[in-house]
Image: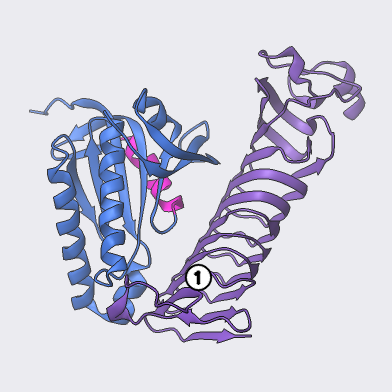
């Protein structure tokens, strides 16, 4: 019997550690594992404060997080970014993180979620720089009346399989209230 | 078919545009129309060359096949087919997105945002820039404000800017005459910074070499790994955090 696929609408956040492959190469597997464990502790701490959001899966050094609402995704991303940067400033975390969020519909597949929203979110995160959060037009629209500050246009990007360009924005400083 | 396009009113053609007929997409052929209220021009291109010329007092003028619309001084140029040339007034903000093809911005513009996958990017002068590319070589002239560039593998060169926020993976990063704070990250690419004023610097690589040149007489505080986050001692002009996992780091005063 085939399970009925559940459609959801929400935000997908992708994170990626900048330079992790090279760090692993020069520092060894043990150091790389310590970084991944450290990152996992940081994101777990953030998601504890955002009950609606959950870690979908780890993808090498990246994380994929699902949030039922855009402000929740932005808050999670901002807090995770701040946590990583605080550790970096203290010299206890060697790498910066980049983040991207897209908002739209996905299909649940067990614990996973799949769909074009996921693919677009992954593409957005790849365009972010160290310690940077990029979001799509759809994320801003889904935030509605939330207080977002420091939003700068980044431009339209083409995503494979998506007919129209996805317009991106950089979020400098965030105060998102659902 | 330049002449035919001027008289046949095709949906996409060589066109000149006036913002005054907004909010509907409008078309004007035969003479440029003044668009002094234009403050943002957004260009969504494809795999074609895009050239923008900022000229004092110029109307927004588009040469090339594209759809153009305008709402409240915000112009959108999309579905670009073939080489595109856009004329704008000096100081206008620009947002440009393409897949590939050279992008050249000549003259002085306001905030400039560019996203492209490949194709060389040349910028003359801007009040601030945000440029993202995968493989493009990026050359920027003078930026009076923040210069933010992300390039996966292309070389980045900035001739002068205030605050710099630059990141790449493997391409070389060269910043000259920097008057503000610097954040420069690379994985394996070399970073070269030439500071015009003593300001805080954070330059990090995994394997790439880092070279920082400070103005003559500057006294930089370079905290060791164990003292990151500590306050700068009195008497120091700036804090320089330049660290690489395996690359060589050289900080000199000219």
**Looking at the picture, does residue A135 appear above or below residue B211?**
above
Decide whether residue A76 is among the magenta residues.
no
**Looking at the picture, does residue B33 appear above or below residue B147?**
above
**Looking at the picture, does residue A36 appear above or below residue A29?**
above
Indicate the chain coloured blue by its letter: A
- Residue B177 falls left or right of residue B62: left
- Looking at this view, name the residue that lies furthest to the left: A1
| Residue at the spot of label 1 | B170
Q: Residue at x 17, y 39 (%)?
A: A50
Q: Residue at x 46, y 86 (%)?
A: B248
In the image, which residues are magenta?
A: A115-128
- Residue B209 falls left or right of residue B29: left
Q: Position of residue A111 (x, y in %)?
A: 14, 40
**Looking at the picture, does residue A90 appear above or below residue A57?**
below
Q: Position of residue A102 (x, y in %)?
A: 36, 37
Decide whether residue A116 is among the magenta residues.
yes
Secondary structure of residue under mark 1: loop
Q: What is the quadrant of residue B59 in the picture? A: top right
Which of B88/B233 is in front?
B233
Disc 1 packing (10 Å; few <14; some 14–19; many ≥20): many
- Residue B21 falls left or right of residue B5: left
User: Looking at the image, can residue B48 be seen?
Assistant: no
Quadrant for the C terminus of chain B, please: bottom right
Q: What is the quadrant of residue A68 in the picture? A: top left
Q: Position of residue B16 (x, y in %)?
A: 82, 25
């Amino acid at each position: 019997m085939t399970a009925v696929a559940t459609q959801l609408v929400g935000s997908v956040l992708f994170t990626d550690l900048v330079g992790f492959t090279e760090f692993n190469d020069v520092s060894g597997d043990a150091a790389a594992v310590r970084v991944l464990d450290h990152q996992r502790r940081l994101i777990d701490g953030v998601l504890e404060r955002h009950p609606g959001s959950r870690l979908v899966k780890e993808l090498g050094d990246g994380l994929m997080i699902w949030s039922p609402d855009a402000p929740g995704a932005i808050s999670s991303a901002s807090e995770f970014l701040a946590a990583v940067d605080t550790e970096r400033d203290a010299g206890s975390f060697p790498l910066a993180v980049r983040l991207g969020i897209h908002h739209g519909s996905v299909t649940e597949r067990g614990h996973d979620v799949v769909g074009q929203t996921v693919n677009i979110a992954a593409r957005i995160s790849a365009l972010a720089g160290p310690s940077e959060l990029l979001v799509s037009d759809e994320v801003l629209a889904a935030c509605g009346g939330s207080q977002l500050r420091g939003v700068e246009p980044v431009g339209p990007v083409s995503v494979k399989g998506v007919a129209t360009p996805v317009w991106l924005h950089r979020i400098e400083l965030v105060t998102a209230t659902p | 078919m330049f002449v035919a396009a001027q008289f046949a009113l095709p949906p996409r053609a060589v066109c000149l545009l006036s913002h005054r007929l907004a909010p509907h997409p409008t078309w004007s052929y035969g003479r440029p129309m003044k668009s002094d209220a234009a403050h943002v021009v957004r260009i969504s291109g494809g795999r074609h060359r895009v050239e923008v010329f900022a000229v004092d007092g110029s109307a927004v003028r588009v040469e090339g096949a594209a759809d153009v619309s305008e709402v409240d001084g915000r112009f959108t140029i999309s579905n670009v087919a073939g080489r595109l040339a856009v004329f704008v007034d000096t100081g206008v903000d620009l947002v440009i997105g393409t897949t590939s093809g050279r992008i050249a911005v000549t003259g002085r513009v306001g905030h400039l945002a560019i996203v492209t996958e490949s194709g060389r990017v040349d910028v003359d002068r801007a009040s601030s820039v945000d440029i993202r590319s995968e493989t493009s070589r990026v050359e920027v002239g003078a930026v009076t404000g923040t210069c933010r560039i992300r390039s996966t593998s292309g070389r980045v060169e900035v001739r002068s800017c205030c605050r710099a926020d630059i990141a790449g993976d493997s391409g070389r990063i060269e910043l000259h005459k920097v008057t503000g704070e610097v954040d420069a990250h690379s994985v394996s690419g070399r970073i070269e910074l030439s500071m015009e004023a003593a300001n805080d610097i954070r330059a990090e690589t995994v394997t790439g070499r880092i070279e920082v040149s400070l103005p003559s007489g500057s006294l930089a505080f370079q905290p060791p790994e164990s003292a990151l986050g500590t306050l700068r001692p009195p008497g120091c002009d700036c804090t320089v955090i330049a660290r690489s996992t395996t690359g060589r780091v050289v900080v000199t005063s000219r």
